[in-house]
Each structure stands twice: as structure tokens, then as C-alpha cells.
Image (cartoon, rainbow, N blue to C red):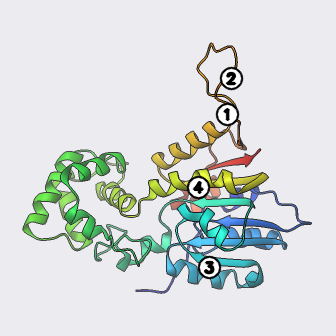
Amino acid sequence: MSDNFEHVSVLPNEVEAAFEFDPGREAVLIDGTLGGGGHSGRLLQKYPKLRLLGIDRDDLALKAAAEHLSFAADRITLVKGNFSTMAEIAKAHNVEKVDGILLDIGVSSPQLDQADRGFSWRLEAPLDMRMDQSSQLTASRYLNHTSEAELERILRVYGEVNKSRKMAAAIVAARQQKPLANTSDLVKICDEVLGRSRRGELPAPTLVFQAVRIAVNDELGELEAALPQTVELLNTGGRVAVITFHSLEDRIVKNFFRNESLSCICPPGLPMCMCKKQATLRAVNRKIITAGAEELAQNRRAASAKLRVAERI
């Protein structure tokens, strides 16, 4: 496996602008999806008193981040773990409250580009797709042991795959002949069932691989578990910024921010509030923040990136 982990962070200027730390006092940032440390590095350079708790489940990412952020070695703590346990990780490192939380959801460029990770359908490799290489659940194991009904569901929901039922049935039929082991095994089924994509559409294997990757790494479950912890951890005035690349992820973030911004959720018509709910967040950007033309010209993977920011009240 290659040790090279060079990731181009999406929306770098927009993420930097999302956080407004007081340069005259110490502040703490949790980067729950550290990657190579691109976003955090910019913020550590801008704010000399900023301290970072960086979390990632990819060992190669943590190694790359340690090198990239070495200029601030005395201000960073890097931890291997899932961002869904950020409150537990923070407590273990004596961090009670923080001033910023950043989550960049999804797969990174190095994970896609390293053939042996098995994330890309374009590269021949074992069907792996694990963000955490110590996990026991590989894409191969998932595809060879998951029920046909569940395969159909994840293809339809996570990948919005046309003919998801036929695709699931074909996977089950193929694995009965021999276990699916390599990316080419899954691509072959995609070609046979889904055929060539129309011009302007994503190649069919892209959506299938996306669905399997999300399932293998429980990406939506991680996000749903992490968001309530941001409210728990943030100081008043602290901000949480979330970058998503998939409509399902963005919907989860949008709905969470909206729900946390409401002060009352009682049915209309009641003479007084009975729910006693208090708003905890204020949306900083009403509209989704996306990449500008200049960034898109340099980094095509930024095209699907969406940023939402909220502030603790």
C-alpha cells in the first residue's frame, strides 16, 4: 500500500471564512474528519492561539496530517477514531468545550486514487473500501454476505441506482458462482445489468461503488450520531461547519440544523408552548455554499461539495 496521501481540500476559502475565532485568546477546534489536515492547517496558520483536536479513522491520513501540521506540533492532538465518538474522544483528552467543529464527509482523493484501497471502479484492486484498515468489514465481505433485500435497499437509497432490484439479484447470482473479490468483478455486473450510461450521466459503476462504500463505512450512521454531539461540545458563539457530497448527507445536516434552530415544535393552536424546546443553533448561511468557478476549474471533485454552517446560541 502506498504511503502517499496528498489531498486537495474542497472549499478551502469558504471553510476558513466560516470560523471567526478571537485571535487574542486561545480557542479549540475539533476536525472530526482530519484527512491530510488541509482545512485545519489554514486555520492553525491564521490563528496562532488555536488548538486542534484532529480525528480520523485512516492511519495514512493521520500520518500525512502530522507531517503537514508539524509547524504547529505543540498545538495539535491527533487521534485515530470515528467522528461519531468525538464527545468521548474530547473527554478523554480533557476537552470539555470547543469553539469550532469541522466535518468533511465522504471519501478523500487519496483513498480514491490509491488502487489498493478499492474505492474506485476505474482501478483494478481487491474490493476493500475501508476507511479504517483495521475494520473487519470489507466491501467484498459485505457484498458476499448481505441479503438480496438489503443490497437492493442500499443500491436504491445510497446510490439511487436504476434497476437496483436487478442489480442486487445479479450480485447474489454471481457470488453463488464465485465470491466477488476484485473491483472488476463488481464492474462486470454493472456493465451487464446497467449498461453504458447516457451522455452527461455519471457512469453506472460510480453510483454502485458509492452505495457500497457508504454502507461499508456506515457513513450516514456516523453523521447522524455525530451531529447532536456538536451541540453538546460547542461554546456559545462556536460554529459547526459540515461539508457533504451526497444529497442524503446534506439532507441529514439540513434537517438537523433546522430542527435545532426551532424554539417550539408544539402543534399549532395550543394556547401556550408545552414542549419547552429551546433553540440551540442558528444557521449562518441560509443557502448552501458551493465551489466557485475558479476552484471548479482546478478541482473537479469540488463540484458536488456543499457547505452548511451553524452557530451555537
Q: Which mark is residue 277?
A: 1
Residue 48 position, x and y percent, is 84, 73
Furthest-left residue in view?
177
Q: CA distance from mark 2 to mark 3?
A: 48 Å
Q: Is residue 166 above or below residue 302?
A: above
Q: Which mark is residue 67?
A: none
Q: Which mark is residue 65?
A: 3
Sequence-earlier tag: 4 or 2:
4
Sequence-earlier tag: 1 or 3:
3
How many residues crowd mark 2 within 10 Å: few (<14), some (14–19), many (20+)? Answer: some
Q: Residue at x 10, y 59 (%)?
A: 173
Residue topped by disc 4: 243
Q: Residue at x 58, y 57 (%)?
A: 296
Instruction: Assign a secondary structure to mark 3.
Output: helix
Q: CA distance from mark 4 to mark 2?
A: 34 Å
**Labelled pair 3, 4 in contact (Cβ < 8 Å):** no
**Labelled pair 1, 2 in contact (Cβ < 8 Å):** yes
Residue topped by disc 2: 273
Residue closest to the eye, 236 or 205: 236
Q: CA distance from mark 4 to mark 1?
A: 27 Å
